[in-house]
Amino acid sequence: MAETEVLIVGAGPAGLMLAPELASQPIPFRITEASLVRSDKSRALVLHPRTLEFLARHGIVQNFLSRGTFNDSVRIFANRKFVFEIDLKKPPFRDTMFPNPLIIS
């Protein structure tokens, strides 16, 4: 068995983001995961621009963009009643930028 410098415990978001970073170094690693089957549920609500930059750096961003949906607004509900809507095309603060995730070099 090959020597492992890093043991990643858990194949969740943090472990699976760490793996390509280590592989690009190259640093030997091993991932362990308690679950024997992959979940069919997603807990991801959004991919932030920094995450898209990371995925682009590893050449896999298009895999995510092609399966995702871009939203122009977010509606907040509490107790099944509409509370607030955020229009992402018009940032709420002048110093806030919403970069276009499709423009990734």
Image (spheres, rainbow, N blue to C red):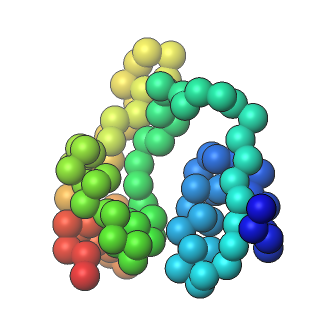
The picture places residue 60, in percent across and down from the top left corner, at 34, 63
Q: Is residue 87 above or below residue 55?
A: above
Q: Pick the quarter of the image with the N terminus.
A: bottom right
Residue 67, image x, y percentages: 25, 44
| Residue 23 in the figure: left or right of residue 98 | right
Q: Residue at x 65, y 56 (%)?
A: 15
Nearest the viewer among 27 and 14 is: 27
Residue shown at the point (62%, 65%) measured from the top left:
18
Quadrant in which residue 68 is drawn: top left
Residue 16 point in image, percent of width and height: 58, 56
Q: Is residue 98 visible?
A: no
Residue 7 locus on image (x, y percent): 78, 61
Is residue 13 something one can see in this rendering? Answer: yes
Task: Relative to 56, say whether 33 is above or below.
Answer: above
Foreground: 45 or 3?
A: 3
Image point (73%, 47%), residue name: 32
Q: Quadrant of residue 53?
A: bottom left
Instruction: Please determine whether, in this image, residue 98 is positioned above or below residue 86.
Output: below
